[in-house]
Image: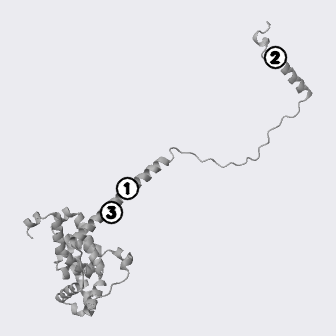
Amino acid sequence: MTRNTALSLTPDQAFDALYAFCAPALVRQTYLLTGRRELAREAVERAFQAAWQRWPEVARDRDPGGWVRATAYEYALSPWHGFRPRYRTPEPPPADPDARALLNALLRLPPSYRRTLVLYDGVGLDLPETAAETEASTPAAAGRLTRAREAVAAQVPELADPAALHRRLMELASTERLRADAPTTVRASGERRNVFWTRAAIAFTVAIIGATGLTLRSAPTHYEAPVAPAQAVRGVPPAPALGPLSPTEATLRAKLRGEAANGPERLAPSPG
């Protein structure tokens, strides 16, 4: 596809062309990484769905196929798949004993070694490209590749030759019945997933705003000190009670009651 032809394509057509060119090979590569046919297909679909969501960026990338490949590899090697019930049961191994031995040797490698080996001896990238895609320095990538080859050769001695290893990797990937869905299906499922997560984010935001408003409405606006529980006061003498009046006190009370407290004596006192 020439550059002028690519520029004349619509986004849908450009995506479909990239998918048709890269997806079948990527499914085979991710199978070498995981040993699981369904996970390999899922990883490639998720990678292309991510590419479709960010298509303007991916379309302008120097290597769109490399962008999708790196995303698919990251998804395929995620350790979280081990917690998913559908991937706890191992899949049937390849029927061919040689293919089964090679796949077992690959799956015993650390994920970073396995990825480096597949990129260099399987895909055919050179060492600097392999290092860049695995986010490692060139010497580190070379060390991983060397140790990965040694580990595979220790279990399958006839694969000590890199050319033989490359040939067997291609045979293992091509003999398995691996499929990729149609690009229109991948685009549609990616759009549905995007709509779902967008709506979920909106619903979550609305719930947070509602909870915040309810909290502000029901929260106290000032501090109210707690009331201490009532306790009986001990050691205080009881208040004295008034007893019966003595004769002198009774006479005084009668005298006071008999005198006019508000009479003329107060309004016009006698001249003294």
What amino acid does circle 3 point to?
Phe
Q: Nearer the viewer, residue 23 or 263?
A: 23
Nearer to us: label 1 or label 3: 3
Query: Looking at the rendering, which quadrant does residue 176 occupy?
Result: bottom left
Query: Looking at the rendering, which quadrant does residue 43 occupy?
Result: bottom left
Residue 196 marker: 3
Which residue appears at 21% of the width and 71% of the height? Answer: 183
Question: Quadrant of the image for the N terminus?
Answer: bottom left
Q: Secondary structure under badge 2?
A: loop
Nearer to us: label 3 or label 2: 3
Question: Quadrant of the image for the C terminus?
Answer: top right
Distance from disc 1 to disc 3, alpha carbons, whole Å, reads: 14 Å
Image coordinates of residue 132 in percent, x first then y, are 20, 72
Q: Nearer the viewer, residue 64 or 161?
A: 64
Q: Which residue is mark 1?
A: 205
127 lies left or right of 109: left
What amino acid does circle 1 point to?
Thr
Which residue appears at 47% of the width and 50% of the height? Answer: 215
Image coordinates of residue 180 in percent, x first then y, are 23, 76
Q: Secondary structure under badge 1?
A: helix
Q: Which residue is mark 2?
A: 260
* Residue 18 showing in the rendered view: yes
